[in-house]
């Protein structure tokens, strides 16, 4: 039976943190067992906000190595760098020309990020969701794992595929682009900042203490958890809107210790922060240690990461080229080969 195809990615905008791992990469590791999985490092998305070129290249390689260190297996999935497949930019242009600008202006992420950029907001930032649509649609993805924050972008990708390409350009009612569905993960917990329990943990937060990265050594994890914001209530509990930090730290503990929320709620109900924080610290260190060991091996032999990326590129290219050709033909660009559909 044909396995359903899944596509996902992370931007190399900084060090991968617990949120990226718990909310995304950890889920991909499970998905690759049952789905045809394509994961890319979305470096073209990372340049939609101001960036340092040297750091971008370093973070791109490090993110790819971390995918593997976290358990993405190049024998089970395709791992590649978005900019290595030029079809992403090409399809993005074709989709730009049929996407109404007001669809993009109402995207929540654009509005939020544009406020932070002020006058310097780039066309690329506005266009981010069209590039994301191109990423997904190029691979005929059946499913896209999405968190709450990306649902609006996936909806846009669906509208572009269905309303703007398939219904306008298909001559025989066959799909030119597959319309992808969201894959809501069971355990897609949102991890919040350590310094502010109502903001999401983020690579671009200027405060390093707001996140634990997967490469933080044990002493750094210990220090960050010691400094993590707490409150002065007695006992620890989930789901108290007055206590977002307690909810977040308990949640991280429940996931990483493997105990689950129910057990942790009982275990910690009469615990103080002084007793809980070392438990959480140990659970985090134990979870990320094997990732760090594998990462160090991979980075010591850069040839291996390169080989994985070359293989992923080849696999991705094969699929992407076929889709791009299909769209070009359908919209009337003169080619020298027949359409593939
Ligand atoms: N805090 C989080 N909790 C759970 N999941 C998260 N993700 C990101 N932050 C959290 C998930 O990670 C995947 C990749 O995200 P991305 O790099 O494409 O962009 P992002 O969501 O904007 O992530 P960051 O870390 O906040 O990056 P910056 O600071 O550059 O914007 C997505 O699946 C996302 O849901």
Image (tube, rainbow, N blue to C red):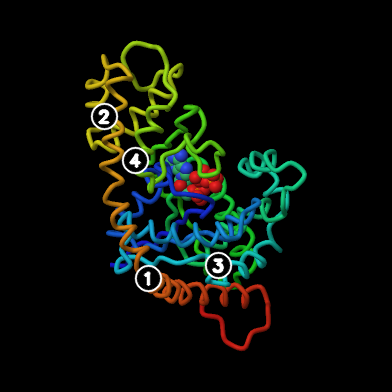
Q: Are marks 1 and 3 in contact (CB under 8 Å)?
A: no
Q: Secondary structure at mark 3?
A: helix
| Residue behind mark 1 | 308
| Residue behind mark 3 | 83
- Closer-to-camera residue (147/121): 121
Residue pictured at 58% horizontal, 56% vertical: 45
| Residue behind mark 2 | 279
N-term mark: 4 or 1: 4
| Residue behind mark 4 | 187
Mark-to-mark CA distance, 1 and 3: 16 Å
Query: Which picture quadrant has residue 53?
Result: bottom right
Mark-to-mark CA distance, 1 and 2: 36 Å
- Closer-to-camera residue (167/329): 329
Q: Position of residue 224 (x, y in %)?
A: 41, 33
Q: Which residue reaches farthest bottom?
A: 336
N-term mark: 3 or 4: 3
């Amino acid at each position: 039976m044909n396995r359903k195809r899944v596509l996902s990615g992370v931007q190399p905008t900084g060090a991968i943190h617990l949120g990226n791992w718990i909310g995304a990469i950890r889920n991909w590791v499970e998905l690759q067992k049952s789905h045809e999985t394509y994961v890319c490092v979305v470096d073209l998305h990372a340049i939609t906000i101001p960036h340092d070129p040297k750091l971008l290249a370093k973070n791109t390689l490090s993110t790819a190595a971390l995918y593997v260190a976290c358990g993405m297996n190049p024998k089970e999935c395709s791992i590649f760098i978005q900019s290595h497949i030029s079809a992403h930019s090409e399809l993005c242009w074709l989709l730009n020309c049929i996407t109404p600008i007001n669809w993009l202006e109402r995207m929540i992420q654009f509005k939020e990020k544009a406020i932070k950029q002020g006058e310097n907001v780039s066309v690329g930032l506005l266009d981010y969701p069209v590039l994301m649509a191109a990423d997904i649609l190029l691979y005929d993805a059946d499913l896209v794992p999405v968190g709450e924050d990306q649902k609006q972008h996936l909806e846009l990708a669906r509208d572009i595929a269905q309303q703007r390409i398939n219904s306008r350009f298909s001559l025989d009612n066959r799909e030119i682009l597959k319309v992808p569905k969201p894959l809501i993960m069971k355990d897609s917990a949102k991890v919040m900042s350590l310094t502010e329990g109502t903001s999401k943990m983020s690579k671009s937060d200027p405060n390093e203490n707001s996140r634990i990265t997967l490469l933080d050594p044990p002493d750094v994890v210990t220090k960050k958890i010691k400094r993590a914001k707490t409150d002065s209530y007695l006992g620890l509990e989930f789901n108290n809107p007055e206590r977002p930090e307690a909810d977040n730290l308990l949640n991280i503990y429940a996931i990483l210790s493997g105990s689950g929320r129910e057990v942790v709620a009982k275990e910690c109900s009469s615990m103080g922060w002084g007793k809980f924080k070392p438990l959480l610290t140990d659970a985090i260190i134990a979870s990320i240690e094997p990732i760090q060991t594998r990462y160090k091996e991979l980075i010591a032999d850069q040839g291996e990461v390169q080989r994985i990326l070359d293989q992923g590129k080849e696999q991705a290219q094969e699929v992407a080229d076929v889709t791009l050709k299909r769209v070009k033909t359908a919209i009337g660009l003169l080619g020298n080969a027949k359409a593939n559909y």
